[in-house]
Amino acid sequence: MANTIPRKPEETLALLDQMINGVEKNRTDLGNYADELLKRFVPIRDNLRAAIRKRTETAGLARQATQELHTTTRTAVQAAQQFRFLLYAQYGKQNAKLRGFGLRTLKNRWMSRKKKTD
């Protein structure tokens, strides 16, 4: 028995189920009032059940989409690394053309050392 109405959807659904079952069992005591209660609260219970089901399905789709995003990102990072390595192999790491591809160039270490010693 609930003293307060629970706020969690699953618990509220369970409570509504119990109340509706109670109304159906005690239909003779409630008379015409039972039909009015059922007309009013059965659709609400069914809507809540559908919303819970939809949330569960949506959560599954969200997990699947997140997994696909991680997989696709991992593949894209690997492809970008391979692409970068190919460009470095083609142009070398110090060629200014690499800036056109969005890559940094490395400074010539020999020239850097020579400037420091002068």
Image (tube, rainbow, N blue to C red):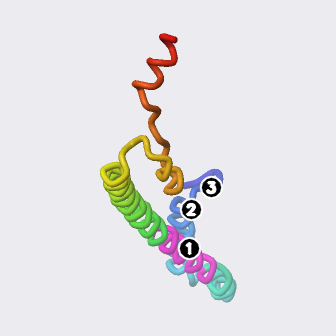
Could you say which is closer to the camera, residue 25 or residue 60? 60
Say which residue label 1 marks.
Answer: 51
Q: Is residue 7 left or right of residue 64?
A: right
Q: Residues within 10 Å of mark 2 (few under 14, many from 20)?
A: few
Helix, strand or loop for disc 3: loop
Residue 74 location (% of width, % of height):
35, 55
Could you say which is closer to the camera, residue 45 or residue 19? 45
Residue 22 location (% of width, % of height):
53, 72
Could you say which is closer to the camera, residue 55 or residue 114? 114
Q: Which residues are magenta?
A: 42-56
Say which residue label 3 marks.
Answer: 7
Q: Residues within 10 Å of mark 1 (few under 14, many from 20)?
A: few
Q: Residue at x 38, y 60 (%)?
A: 76
User: Which is in the foreground here, disc 1 or disc 3?
Assistant: 1
Magenta stretch: dominant SS? Answer: helix
Examine the image and state in which quarter residue 16 appears.
bottom right
Say which residue label 2 marks.
Answer: 9
